[in-house]
Image (cartoon, grey):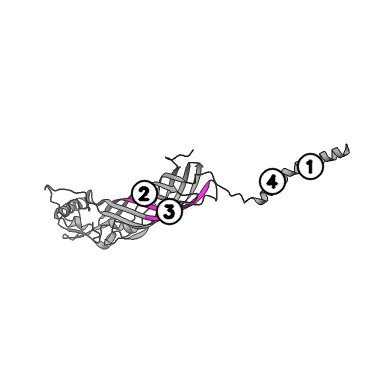
Amino acid sequence: MKRTLLTTIILFVLATLTPCLMRGQEVISSEPVHYHDTTWYDKGFDLYIGAGAFFANKENALYYNGSSLNECNLDYIFDNQYWYQEIQQVVNRMYPHVSISDEISYREENLDWNVRYKIKTMLNLGARYKFGRNWGISLSYSFCRLTTSSQFLLDYSSVSGNMVEAPVMEIHGKEDRSMLDLSVSYLISQMHPIAKPFVEVGAQFNFCKARLMDAIIGDRKWTMLDPYMGESYVPGAQMNTYDIIYGGPGYGISFAAGLKIVVTKSFSIDPTFYGCMASYGIKPLQERAFNFNYGFSIRLVMNDFFFRRR
């Protein structure tokens, strides 16, 4: 009986310890377990739409200050005899001390040489194809409509000898800027399951068009964008007008950095900083400036919008 009881106790202890020993041996002999983030799909397409603020470099804004060094300038208005006569009449009506026979002009040094673009909204559309947890390639399109405003002083040679302060006039400009960026992207997906930093570096192709460049003199407005394709304006004449493109294509390099905030497995919100060093078709002072522009945006990203996984 004692032998039977001892045998039973020994078998019970062995039966209890064997699974623990087996698991311990398995842990020692197996390879380390790697963490795999499953909060965001590793491969497939990301599609996004975004909006934010764009800060354009002021060098290109000099295109809209009216200088004779630019292809579109105040001389286009003042050199036309009919528009010049209208300017004399407007100035005389608003500033009676200036004689109708006074010679009206402007001085290059009195133009605004510190004109800037106003901060404007930038819209984004893009797609990214991910090869794995980290690497991908993206194509994005951005658009913004930029505006400027500046001032210039009218000068005149008085025949009557009356002296008044030089009247201050305005110039308004408007520009459409489209940017296409082809980039390589890297997402640090292993750092945190919800907040994932990313960077993008690539090439930019852009197109700029000056839509408006008006000189406001008194209560009248004159365009400096030649709609007559070189022909001099004559009142009452049957003249054809043309939609001439002032601007053109450009190129550069771009980069972006941001934080992917995962909301669901297929949706994220990405605060993003965007920057580019580029040349644009708008040529201020007869030169093609290569300068830095930047912006901030919020992207709403949908993962596998068309290619859902089961």
Position in image of residue 16 (x %, y %) = 75, 41
Circle nearer the viewer, 3 or 1: 1
Seen from the viewer's position, the closer of residues 62 and 275 is 275
Q: Residue at x 75, y 44 (%)?
A: 17
Of circles 2 and 4, the one toward us is 4
Q: In front of the other: label 3 or label 2?
A: 3
Left or right: 215 as drawn, with respect to 159: right
Q: How far apart are marks 3 and 4 (CA)?
A: 45 Å
Q: Name the residue under label 2.
A: 142
Lower sequence index among marks 3 and 4: 4
- Within 10 Å of disc 1 (Cα), the crowding (few <14, some 14-19, many 20+) is few
Q: Marks 4/1: CA distance? A: 16 Å
Label 4: how many Cα within 10 Å (few below 14, some 14–19, many 20+) = few
Image location of residue 269, percent across then percent down? 47, 44
Q: What residue type is labelled 2?
A: Ser
Disc with the residue nearer the chain's start (3 vs 2): 2
Quickly name the residue at label 4: 23
Instruction: Kindly identify the residue that appears in the image at 34 percent across and 60 percent down.
Output: 290
Q: Are the residues tagged 2 and 4 within 8 Å (C-beta)?
A: no
Residue that carries the numbered disc 1 in the rendered image: 13
The residue beneath circle 3 is 184
* Earlier residue among tags 1 and 2: 1
Secondary structure predominantly adopted by residues drawn in magenta: strand
Tag 3: residue type?
Val
Q: Which amino acid does label 1 sit on?
A: Val
